[in-house]
Image (cartoon, helix red, strand yellow):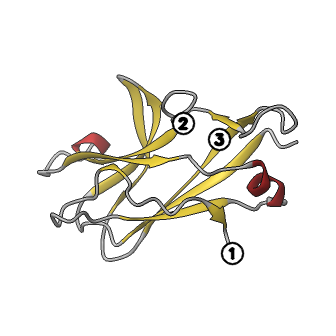
Amino acid sequence: MKSEIILQVILIKPTPNVVFGLQKGAGNNYESVQKQISTSNDLTFTFPVNLKGDESKDKLPRLSGSFVQGSADNKFVYINIGTSAGQSETAWSRRLKIPLTGITWMEISLLEGKSILQTSVLGTGRDGGPNCAIVKPFVGWHLKQS
């Protein structure tokens, strides 16, 4: 069984001129990594998560690692935005919460070699600023097509 899988988040058309970064660590002890300033292009964040559990005993795999946040039944990753990502000259200070729900043993069994699970979320919210809070609706994770 795999002990690590690779996930990828694509932010679709994020608000321009804002820094977005993947949160590594939790609480006050975190850093924003893979920082990118948005232009008119999508942004991509790729990262590993640890895989634990036993398919014969556990209904769903347990995910952990330095990018994984939340309680055992509510795992997610954060994308830090604006000042939360270390940008100084901006009015934005937000975080985008991307659920790790829907990752099943079936998806994991389909991963081969360098395969990854991917999701896409809107980078701009209804107010025209960076999308924030928990992603709704969340389309889930799928095997990245080559």
Residue 65 in picture, x, y percent from top left: 61, 33
Quadrant assignment for the C terminus: bottom right
Residue at the spot x=49%, y=47% of the render?
99
Q: Which residue is nearer to you in this view: 131 or 137?
A: 137
Which structural element holds mark 1?
A: loop
* Mark 1 surroundings: few (<14), some (14-19) or many (≥20) residues within 10 A: few
**Vertical placement of 119 versus 57: above or below?**
below
Residue 145: which disc? 1
Q: Which residue is mark 2?
A: 68
Q: Earlier in the sequence, mark 2 or mark 3?
A: 3
Q: Residue 52's quadrant in the figure?
A: top right
Mark 2 touching mark 3, by CB under 8 A?
yes
Quadrant assignment for the N terminus: top right
Q: In the rendered view, does 141 fall on the left or right side of 29?
A: right
Q: Which residue is mark 3?
A: 49
Calculate the distance from the C-alpha at mark 1 to the C-alpha at mark 3.
Answer: 20 Å
**Residue type, mark 1 in image:** Gln
Q: In the rendered view, does 54 fall on the left or right side of 145?
A: right
Calculate the distance from the C-alpha at mark 2 to the C-alpha at mark 1.
Answer: 24 Å
